[in-house]
């Protein structure tokens, strides 16, 4: 296979402190990168770049690792425009709105669900996302959860079983029976298509004991836990995630000191989802508090039709910098290397030799432009697995 030299970069973010300026981002100024066999083969100053079969002149643009979106809900049908409009007019967000999407998703064909997934993936790719995780959770029957995961698995290896999104409408009067379904026949059908198991541990969804049952059952089937935790209020989700060795606790909006201490003492990544706070007018997660405590933080879109209908990681970076106390450097790291950590991946989220060649060129000289120029379509070109895809 041929090698490609991407050169004349104003700056290159490697996410390797041993590179360039020695910061956590490892920024190399006046840089170049060589791509070969789908991987990064070399990075360094452009004047020292080796020869390659093809050359792409970046014309003074910045290069960053492709975004790693570690939390999304992309297998669904319909939308919730009316709910959003009402919420922006003063009605608070509650977990039960998910039922609207459940009804539409159950009624959709496989082809319709896959077409929607592909459309949203294309949207994300154009904005620099090269790796994404996505979940089931809008079917809530054995057949509908299984088909959601089967469809998702055709497009990503990061597939999450979320039968425990809310209690299915048919089980509203018997949530214990639904937990038995989720941890029994539904898990049996879904586990072959998934890598992860998740649960919405929240008032209006599943309590701590129910969440523990779901996560331990999934773990017994070889699925790695991750948790929707502490989004709508304080609760046991974060500490349960750390106790069970979950890869990530996602949302982390309402945290006690004990929650922060648990995250700081464990290996669970705190994944923050600012699109949800933007779309629900909820209080922002305090990223500064987590970072100062030494917690590993990821940023993700939470793209879903109800509470965060955005696929834009640059938008989430801008929100995190403006409203969550993050610096531009911290936000970019969290949207790339942080997302990789939340997925237990070391081959993505960085641009160093041996890493997967996933990178985006920005129409600006620095990654800081992602927050400095919010809402501007800055992603000029994208490579994924070494192939230019935009």
Image (spheres, rainbow, N blue to C red):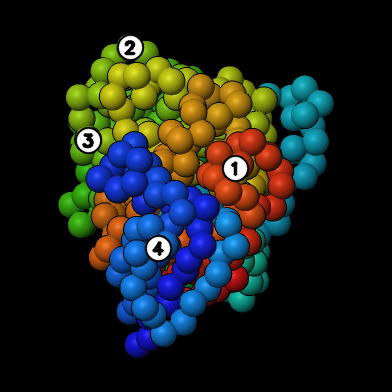
Instruction: Give the Cα distance between marks 2 and 4.
Output: 50 Å
Q: Which residue is mark 4?
A: 47
Q: Residues within 10 Å of mark 2 (few under 14, many from 20)?
A: few
* Residue shown at 49% from the left, 77% from the top: 55
Instruction: Give the Cα distance between marks 3 and 4.
Output: 40 Å
Q: At numbered mark 3, what does the secondary structure look like: helix, strand or loop? A: loop
* Residue shown at 53% from the left, 24% from the top: 324
Q: Is residue 254 above or below residue 368?
A: above
Instruction: Give the Cα distance between marks 2 and 1.
Output: 31 Å
Q: Which residue is mark 3?
A: 267
| Circle nearer the N terminus (3, 4) | 4
* Residue shown at 74% from the left, 24% from the top: 91
Residue 247 point in image, percent of width and height: 28, 43
Q: Residue furthest bottom?
A: 1
* Left or right position of 91 against 19: right
Q: Which residue is mark 1?
A: 370
| Circle nearer the N terminus (3, 2) | 2
Q: At numbered mark 4, what does the secondary structure look like: helix, strand or loop? A: helix
Of circles 3 and 4, the one toward us is 4
Circles 3 and 4: CB atoms closer than 8 Å: no
Residue 227 point in image, percent of width and height: 36, 38
Of circles 1 and 4, the one toward us is 4
Residue 241 point in image, percent of width and height: 28, 33
* Residue shown at 59% from the left, 24% from the top: 323
Q: Which residue is mark 2?
A: 257
| Circle nearer the N terminus (1, 4) | 4
Circles 2 and 1: CB atoms closer than 8 Å: no
């Amino acid at each position: 296979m041929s090698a490609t030299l991407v050169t004349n970069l104003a700056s290159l973010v490697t996410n390797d402190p041993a590179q360039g300026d020695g910061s956590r981002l490892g920024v190399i100024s006046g840089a170049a990168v060589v791509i070969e066999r789908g991987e990064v083969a070399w990075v360094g100053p452009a004047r020292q770049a080796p020869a390659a079969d093809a050359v792409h002149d970046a014309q003074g643009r910045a290069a960053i690792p492709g975004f790693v979106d570690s939390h999304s809900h992309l297998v669904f049908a319909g939308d919730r425009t009316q709910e959003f409009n009402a919420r922006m007019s003063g009605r608070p967000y509650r977990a039960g709105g998910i039922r609207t999407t459940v009804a539409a998703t159950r009624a959709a064909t496989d082809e319709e669900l896959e077409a929607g997934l592909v459309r949203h993936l294309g949207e994300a790719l154009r904005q620099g996302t090269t790796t994404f995780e996505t979940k089931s959770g809008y079917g809530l029957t054995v057949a509908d959860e299984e088909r959601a995961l089967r469809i998702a698995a055709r497009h990503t290896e990061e597939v999450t079983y979320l039968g425990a999104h809310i209690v299915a409408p048919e089980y509203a009067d018997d949530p214990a029976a639904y937990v038995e379904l989720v941890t029994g026949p539904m898990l049996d059908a879904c586990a072959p298509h998934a890598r992860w198991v998740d649960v919405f541990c929240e008032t209006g969804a599943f309590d701590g004991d129910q969440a523990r049952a779901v996560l331990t059952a999934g773990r017994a089937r070889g699925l790695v836990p991750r948790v929707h935790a502490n989004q709508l209020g304080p609760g046991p989700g974060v500490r349960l995630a750390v106790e069970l060795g979950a890869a990530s606790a996602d949302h982390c909006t309402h945290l006690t000191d004990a929650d922060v201490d648990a995250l700081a003492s464990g290996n669970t990544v705190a994944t923050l989802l600012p699109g949800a706070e933007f779309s629900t007018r909820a209080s922002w997660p305090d990223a500064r508090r987590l970072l100062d405590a030494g917690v590993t933080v990821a940023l993700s879109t939470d793209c879903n039709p109800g509470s965060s209908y955005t696929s834009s990681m640059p938008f989430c970076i801008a929100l995190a910098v403006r409203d969550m106390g993050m610096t531009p450097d911290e936000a970019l790291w969290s949207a790339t290397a942080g997302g990789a950590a939340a997925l237990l991946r070391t081959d993505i989220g960085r641009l160093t030799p041996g890493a997967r060649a996933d990178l985006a060129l920005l129409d600006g000289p620095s990654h800081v432009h992602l927050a400095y120029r919010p809402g501007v379509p800055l992603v000029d070109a994208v490579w994924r697995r070494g192939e230019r895809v935009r």
